[in-house]
Image (cartoon, grey):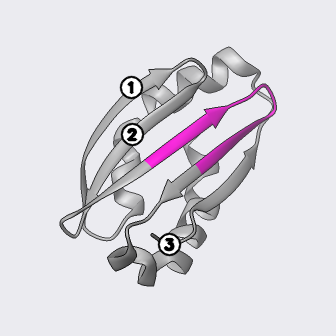
Amino acid sequence: MTEPIIVDVPHHLGLEEAKRRVGGGIGKLAGMFPGGAAVEHHWEGDALAFTVTALGQSVACRLEVEAAKIRAIVDLPPFLGLFAGKIRDKLLKEAPKLLK
């Protein structure tokens, strides 16, 4: 298993509004992974746990929503570890757009 990708996205929305926007944008998350599709998700308190299938691999992800930031945690399987840098860059660029 590779090291997880962890990205913090600051916001000024407050907890409930950030959760609403994250929930509404879940379908866009698969596009952040090469060959990504089929997002399955569920809430665990203030965290959204979801799985993306990318290039035939399951990627476990978690968005921990807080009042002033969202922490994205992506556990890549070893095969997708080659794409870690590109996935991190895409998250940094695209994740703030999910909150708009």
Q: Which residues are magenta?
A: 61-72
- Residue that label 3 marks: 2
Q: Is residue 65 left or right of residue 80?
A: right
Q: Which quadrant does the C terminus fall into?
A: top right
Q: Looking at this rendering, what residue extends furthest in the bottom direction?
A: 82
Q: Is residue 91 left or right of residue 59?
A: right
Type of the residue with mark 2: Phe
Residue depicted at 78% across the width and 25% down the height: 67
63 up-or-down from 87: above or below: above
- In the structure shown, which secondary structural element does the residue marked by tag 3 occupy? loop
Toward which corner of the image does residue 70 lie, by quadrant? top right
- Residue that label 1 marks: 42
- In the structure shown, which secondary structural element does the residue marked by tag 2 occupy? strand
The answer to whether one can see residue 52 in this image is yes
Q: Which quadrant does the N terminus fall into?
A: bottom left
Toward which corner of the image does residue 64 lie, by quadrant? top right
* Magenta portion: prevailing SS class: strand
- Residue that label 2 marks: 50
Residue 19: which disc? Answer: none
Would you call the spot at circle 3 few (<14 residues within 10 Å), some (14-19), or many (20 or more)? few
Nearer the observer, disc 2 or disc 3?
Answer: 3
**In the image, is residue 68 part of the stretch drawn in magenta?**
yes
Would you call the spot at circle 1 few (<14 residues within 10 Å), some (14-19), or many (20 or more)? few
| Labelled pair 1, 2 in contact (Cβ < 8 Å) | yes
Q: Position of residue 12 (x, y in %)?
A: 81, 31
Which of marks 2 and 1 precedes in the sequence? 1
Type of the residue with mark 3: Thr
